[in-house]
Amino acid sequence: MHMQLQTELINCFLEIVYVTFFLNFSNQNLTVRGMIFRFLGFSKIFRHQEAVILAITLSIFSFFSVFLEGFFVVGNLLTLLRSVSVLGILSVAMAIVVISRGIDLSLIGTLVVATALAVILKSPNALFSAGLSFNWAFLVGVVFVIITSSLTGVLITFGNLPAVFVSLAMGSVIYGLGLTFFINTDANYLPDDANWVVFLGSGRLFGIPMPIFCFVFLLITFSFVLNRTAFGQFLYAIGDNTEAARTAGIPVRPVTVLIYVFAGLIAYMAGLLTAGAVTNINTKLFQSTLIYDVLLVVVVGGIGLSGGKGGMRNVLLGTVLIGTLLNGMVILNMSFIEQNLVKGVILLFAIMIDTLLNPRDEQTSQQGDI
């Protein structure tokens, strides 16, 4: 049945593409952007990107609820919300960096190594083994994140190096340092005195998983920061036009470094929640496609890669959309390769749409984007 449903979905998608794209655009003198708007069926109301994302999300959710057995049940919906919470938290971190016209591909390396460091400091094989309680080990992890994230930000801002390459390299450096000096095994289990981490990762409040509360708390916090504080306005100004922001007296470089530090700390929080959910952190997570899922949420959610646009509402919409899609593919028993194919096509398509909706300005073109 799952195979038949997959075939029907693919055939339906191909028919929609053929009818709306090839038939609607034939013999019509339309610009590329006009063709995309016509292809997506944008009316005057739905040209707003967030409305389109919401409509697509509701359509996919409704389709899965009706035709996919086991999707619209309480247990699966709670599992869906719990799983997308960590993805959403990481997307918050990526979003504040992208809004400032940057990117941080080192988030998963930071998540894995900082969490593992906090977890294993009580181990006799640890580099700094001194019988530390987990609370002190947690603070050591915070210091580690601040140092590594600051280094990433400094290299990008003061070294004028491309963020995409610096963050990609730093992710490998952080992961390599961790495995070389203090991480001896793939699975690193939480100590007995890490009860509050277990509660945050797997506990419930009023029947609702705690990671959901953590995700909502972050959304509310950074929504306030972005819209109601000077730091948030600095962030948008830097993303919109870095040189103009610098001319206006905004301390562009220190603010940018601080953004990367915030992103690293949020990734650390996501790592603790992940460890709390399964009582351990597996370093092989670094080799997963999680960072691409995060990028997928941010881009599909409508945060422009050109910077200066978007907010926490976009993160919420993107998280729910991608989370629903991922959950549906798991229930359909799609293979890992098939899931990556679907995600890759969606990401490519979303980047194309983002380029049309948020065209590169002269400064972005000179900088080579992110």
Image (spheres, rainbow, N blue to C red):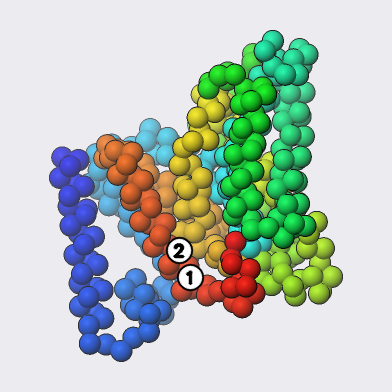
Q: CB under 8 Å between callouts 2 and 1?
A: yes
Residue identifier under label 1: 355
The residue closer to the viewer here, 122 or 229, is: 122
Indicate the secondary structure of the residue bearing disc 2: helix
Q: Residue at x 79, y 70 (%)?
A: 246
Q: Residues within 10 Å of mark 2 (few under 14, many from 20)?
A: some
In this picture, is 48 found above or below 144? below
Vertical placement of 183 versus 58: above or below? above
List the single residue furthest toward the top: 124
Identify which residue is drawn at 74% across, 73% down. 243
Q: Residue furthest bottom?
A: 29
Residue flagged by tag 1: what amino acid is it? Thr
Q: Residue 234 location in percent, x, y?
A: 75, 64
Q: Position of residue 362 (x, y in %)?
A: 61, 78
Q: Which residue is mark 2?
A: 351
The answer to whether residue 37 is left or right of residue 135 is left
Tell me how far mark 2 sits from mark 1, CA to CA.
6 Å
Residue that lies at the very extreme toward the right in this rendered image: 249
Q: Which amino acid lies under the numbered mark 2 shown in the image of this protein? A: Ile
Image quarter for residue 264?
A: top right
27 horizontally vs 31: left or right: left
